[in-house]
């Protein structure tokens, strides 16, 4: 949450930072800002802050606002945690003398104490925002003014003082120095291919991939400084120098970061499922088998994720039960601490995350590691924090997912978990074949005629206040996932249920024309879920069947291929398309749902 970018080099820093920041918009889009250090001995900043999405502004605006030459800049796109969405609360934040500018991602848990300590009878700082971040520039100022620290020492001391998961970059207009610290939130450095004195520092490498593929990863509690074009890395606590390895990143197709002719990332990414499922199962068989064997042999396996990835974990629990006859536990990452009492060095935690940066999952991993449990991750972002803290990992190969609403990463995660379940049953090749067939069925599904059919359904559902989704077995977690898709994309109250649960309460909410989406597969739950659909219909409900075959209970039928145990993959796709089209009808922004951010780096 929140995206940071900093640039130092010979280029036009404000423009480079601004353009790179646009690539981080998915991390937060309440407001944005840039501070550029003016050149020619001016020793001053030019600052822009705006409420709203950065995507709505072009670089001409920045050129006009900061016409002067500048070679160092920091920029930020915000997802509000402390303080409302206002220009004052937008980053960068500055000290009283306007010589230190800071951008920050994460939360400073002890900010109130720091703020109080800075306002004593002998020293008063003027705070202009309600943010936690603003304590950083003022604290650095305090150390420089009152304790005689130089800028880099003061910034390092500030990094030591703040508590909570975060990362920040500070720029000093008087010395022309930059400081960055990573304390639990990602920070990656890019070095220009042909110029070893040109640097990008960002929350995510997609911000600067247009400029360089050469990156260095900061680890937790590491910092860096840039002075006179030279970069140095060090331990935040001790100040001891650190050596960093330069890694060449070639996995991330640059083209994948653009809309490529589509109106939105969301529909582009839905359509990319024509080939991402096949890419996801393109894993090393031996590694799949090794991890599947580890799951079988573990003294307790926990599948851990949040949101959509959490629903994938839940599906995994059913997949392992049904295919491998193996009990695994799925746990919502933010609730994982309640399970820590069961963890031993023989426990295996499988963390599922598109971004590999979700704070709740990282926290679960930390808990598991403290009990010496093993960690395997299923990730979409190579080089992410989770990849680096796990004992082993799989990359789900879906390519960059830019829409906040997860689609292609979800089906890729489902595919890899299915492979693991089949491997645990000693039937890996059978699982691969099943998934390859599902991938080719998805390819057939994703055609304009199919979308037209779902557009007709979108017209029917667009003005509904509530939508129910029901499923059983493998498709129960998918009903929950379908609800998330409709909630975030259309802002409609959608709720998923296990089909059998309706009669225990929720059926009381069903009235004339209440829409109920029924997820059906040709499996042993089929008759029961159709019976549950009849129960809803008998109370006036409007039944939408997502099913390989039509049934008399359906008022509207959406055909899906008969994919056997891959039914969760094919059944979620029409809901993704439906949600996109309802969002368009309602005038929502499908790529940037209100109140959300793609990478949830706060607890
Ligand atoms: O990056 P992660 O997979 O760890 O993200 C987890 C959730 O925040 C994410 O799935 C969220 O629920 C999506 N917005 C769903 O579309």
Image (cartoon, helix red, strand yellow):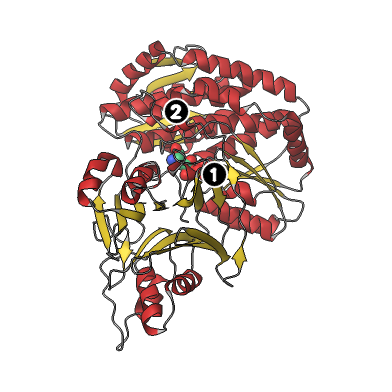
Give the residue pinned by disc 2. Answer: 269
The quarter holding residue 151 reads bottom left
Q: Is residue 274 above or below residue 167?
A: above
Q: Which residue occupies the foreground of this view, 45 or 360?
A: 45
The x, y position of residue 81, in whole percent, is 36, 58
Q: Is residue 535 visible?
A: no
Q: Which residue occupies the foreground of this view, 155 or 386?
A: 155
The x, y position of residue 284, in whole percent, is 71, 30
Which is closer to the viewer, label 2 or label 1?
A: 1
**SS assignment at label 2:** helix
Q: Which mark is residue 41?
A: none
The x, y position of residue 466, in whole percent, is 33, 34
Q: Is residue 309 left or right of residue 3?
A: right
Q: Are marks 2 and 1 in contact (CB under 8 Å)?
A: no
Question: CA separation, marks 2 and 1?
Answer: 26 Å
Q: Which residue is at a point 29% across and 77% down the rendered structure image? A: 125
Q: Which mark is residue 214?
A: 1
Q: Is residue 100 above or below residue 415?
A: below
Q: Which residue is at a point 78% across and 28% down the rendered structure image? A: 426
Q: Is residue 404 left or right of residue 306?
A: left
The quarter holding residue 179 reads bottom left
């Amino acid at each position: 949450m929140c995206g940071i970018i900093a640039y130092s080099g010979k280029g036009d820093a404000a423009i480079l930072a601004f353009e790179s920041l646009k690539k981080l918009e998915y991390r937060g889009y309440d407001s944005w800002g840039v501070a550029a250090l003016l050149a020619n001995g001016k020793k001053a900043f030019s600052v822009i802050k705006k409420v709203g999405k950065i995507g709505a502004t072009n670089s001409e605006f920045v050129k006009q606002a900061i016409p002067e030459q500048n070679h160092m800049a920091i920029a930020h796109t915000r997802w509000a945690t402390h303080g409302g969405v206002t220009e004052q609360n937008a980053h960068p934040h500055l000290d009283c003398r306007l010589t230190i500018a800071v951008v920050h991602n994460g939360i400073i848990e002890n900010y109130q104490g720091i703020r109080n300590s800075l306002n004593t009878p002998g020293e008063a700082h003027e705070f202009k925002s309600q943010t936690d971040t603003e304590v950083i520039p003022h604290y650095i100022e305090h150390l420089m003014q009152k304790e005689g620290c130089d800028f880099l020492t003061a910034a390092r001391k500030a990094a030591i003082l703040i508590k909570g998961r975060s990362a920040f970059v500070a720029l000093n207009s008087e010395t022309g120095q930059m400081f960055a610290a990573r304390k639990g939130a990602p920070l990656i450095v890019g070095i220009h291919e042909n110029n070893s004195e040109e640097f990008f520092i960002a929350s995510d490498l997609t911000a600067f991939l247009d400029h360089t593929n050469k990156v260095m990863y900061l680890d937790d509690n590491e910092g860096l400084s840039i002075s006179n074009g030279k970069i140095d890395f060090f331990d935040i606590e001790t100040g001891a120098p650190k050596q960093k390895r330069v890694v060449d990143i070639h996995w991330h197709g640059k083209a994948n970061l653009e809309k490529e002719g589509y109106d939105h990332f969301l529909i582009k990414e839905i359509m990319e499922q024509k080939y991402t499922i096949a890419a996801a199962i393109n894993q090393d068989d031996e590694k799949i088998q090794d991890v599947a064997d580890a799951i079988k042999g573990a003294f307790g396996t926990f599948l851990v994720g949040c949101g959509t990835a959490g629903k994938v974990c839940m599906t995994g629990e059913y997949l392992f039960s049904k295919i491998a006859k193996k009990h695994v536990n799925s746990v919502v990452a933010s609730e994982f601490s309640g399970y820590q009492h069961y963890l031993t060095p023989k426990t295996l935690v499988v963390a599922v995350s598109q971004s590999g940066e979700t704070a709740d999952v990282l926290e679960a991993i930390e808990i598991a590691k403290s009990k010496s449990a093993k960690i395997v991750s299923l990730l979409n972002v190579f080089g992410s924090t989770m990849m680096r803290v796990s004992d082993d990992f799989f990359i789900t190969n879906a390519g960059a997912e830019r829409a906040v609403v997860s689609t292609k990463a979800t089906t890729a995660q489902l595919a890899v978990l299915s492979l693991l379940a089949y491997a645990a049953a000693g039937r890996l090749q059978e699982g691969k074949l099943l998934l390859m067939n599902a991938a080719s069925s998805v390819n057939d599904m994703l055609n304009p005629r199919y979308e037209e059919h779902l557009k007709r359904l979108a017209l029917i559902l667009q003005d509904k206040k509530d939508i129910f989704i029901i499923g059983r077995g493998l498709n129960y977690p998918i009903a929950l996932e379908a609800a998330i898709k409709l909630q975030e994309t259309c802002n409609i109250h959608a709720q998923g249920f296990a089909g059998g649960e309706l009669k225990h309460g929720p059926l009381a909410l069903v009235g004339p024309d209440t829409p109920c989406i029924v997820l059906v597969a040709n499996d042993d739950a089929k008759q029961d879920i159709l019976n549950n659909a009849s129960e809803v219909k008998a109370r006036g409900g409007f039944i939408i069947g997502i099913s390989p075959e039509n049934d008399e209970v359906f008022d509207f039928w959406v055909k899906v291929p008969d994919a056997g145990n891959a039914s969760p993959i094919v059944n979620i796709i029409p809901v993704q398309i439906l949600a996109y089209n309802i969002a368009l009808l309602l005038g929502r922004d499908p790529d940037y749902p209100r109140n959300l951010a793609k990478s949830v780096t706060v607890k």
